[in-house]
Image (cartoon, rainbow, N blue to C red):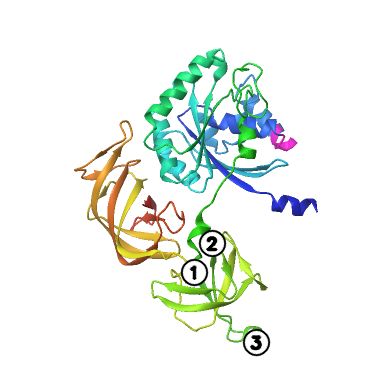
Amino acid sequence: MENKGYLDMELLRFSTAGNVDDGKSTLIGRLLYDSKSIFEDQMEAVETASRSRGNEEINLALLTDGLRSEREQGITIDVAYRYFATPRRKFIIADTPGHIQYTRNMVTGASTADLAIILIDVRNGVQEQTLRHSYIASLLGIQHVAVCINKMDLADYSQTVFDEIKDRYLQISKEFRPDCIHFIPVSAKLGDNVVEKSTNMTWYEGHTLLELLETITVKRSTKNIGLRFPVQYVIRPISDNFHDFRGYAGKVAGGTANRGDSIIALPSGQRSKITAITLAEKEIETAHEGVSAAIQLADDIDVGRGDLLVSADDEQPQISQTISLTVCWFNQTPLRAGNRYIIRHTTRETQGIVKSIDSRINISTMEKETGIENLVMNDIAEITLKTATPLVFDHYKKNRTTGSLIFIDQNTFETVGAGMIF
């Protein structure tokens, strides 16, 4: 029964972001340490590593900074994922880099998050990277943002300083900040308001960070637009046990698949009904969002990898070869109008050409700049893309999977950019 209870617990995915040295890794280390989510051998390894580095205290950042280059430089480079649970909820943490050079890694880590923690060093206040990460969080449709104003011990736990930074953040982020925003004064190093309430800031009456993570309500809206099932693979076993079996394997990206439901296969527009849903050779009645399964249809229609099965009775996605989207550019090679890329959207790959760069976001002023000839690494811009074959998509705010795509370099096959369709 205990295992079943654990499996049934709600999962919250959250990411951390902020400037270099704002204390992201230390905050996550403190969260894991104070919530007793660290194994004894892990703690011994961190203590040994801290001593070898000459640290006078245990360096909790080492719990997440796993690469050798990260530990040597004292910065986060790659996205570090950590898993832990409390009696109330399960968590997946994406500890993302703060350095502008690794903004692309921050986009990757935050792309599946329900909540973003934005750290601000109380000594430095709101920085350009603070705005960049906050803006990216809004683009990615993250519903909740927890602004943790860190190192409050270095400001004598001053409420006045906290309020000044809070007001500044609210002022300059008013055009893109989410409706659900929470401000928490913390000291990650000493543990104030991370898991336990701080006795040094009695003026603060809100939640600790862990209390917020355990109690926040996350609403996922993908069920409102009906089934979204990108076909990954057609299963046609040649065996006596599975005569004439044809199943379409994939992961439910929105809504639910139910036996008996009427569906449309896009982009062809052919119609059929779901006759069976198979999960690990066992038939089930319903496959919910996030479940990988094989779907069988009543009719022998032409469906293959890259097609999308959708509910016949619900809102339909758009189908087009010309798409306007917001792109985050990841690569040192600039994006220019006329450049060609491999476009990966759900399980479909096609060729695409950039028709135009319509505007670029100035992170410092939040203004849209026009007349831009190229995008450099970490630029965020609105572009128009033309694809060789039609894409079937929703707006990103309705469905993250069908509303996003990535750009792949045709020569190196490296991911060079990510786009959100609005």
Camera-nearest residue between 261 and 31: 261
Q: Quadrant of residue 102?
A: top left
Where disc 3 sits, the SS reads helix
Residue at which label 3 appears: 240
50 to 282, vertically: above or below:
above
Residues at marks 2 and 1 touching, judged by CB atoms closer than 8 Å: yes
Q: In this view, does 312 lie above or below 238?
A: above
Q: How crowded is mark 3: few (under 14 residues within 10 Å), some or many (20 or more)?
A: few
In reply to whether residue 38 is colored magenta, the answer given is: yes
The circle on residue 255 is 2
Of label 3 and label 1, which has the lower sequence position?
3
Give the residue type at disc 2. Answer: Gly
Image quadrant in which you'd find residue 410: bottom left
Residue 389 horizontal/vertical position (percent): 32, 68
- Mark 2 or mark 1: whose residue is earlier in sequence: 2
Q: In the depicted view, which residue is nearer to us: 414 or 49?
A: 414
The amino acid at mark 1 is Ser
Which residues, given as a range, are shown in magenta?
A: 36-43
Element under label 1? strand
Q: Is 244 included in the stretch rendered in magenta?
A: no
Q: Residue furthest right?
A: 1
In this rendering, the answer to whether 238 lies above or below 304 is below
Q: How far apart are marks 2 and 3 (CA)?
A: 34 Å
Position of residue 123 in the picture relative to residue 153 (left or right): left
Relative horizontal placement of residue 1, taking residue 417 as reference (left or right): right
Q: Do the residues labelled 2 and 3 touch (CB within 8 Å)?
A: no
C-alpha separation, residue under disc 3 versus residue under disc 1: 32 Å
The vertical placement of 256 against 129, above or below, is below
Which numbered tag is attached to residue 311? 1
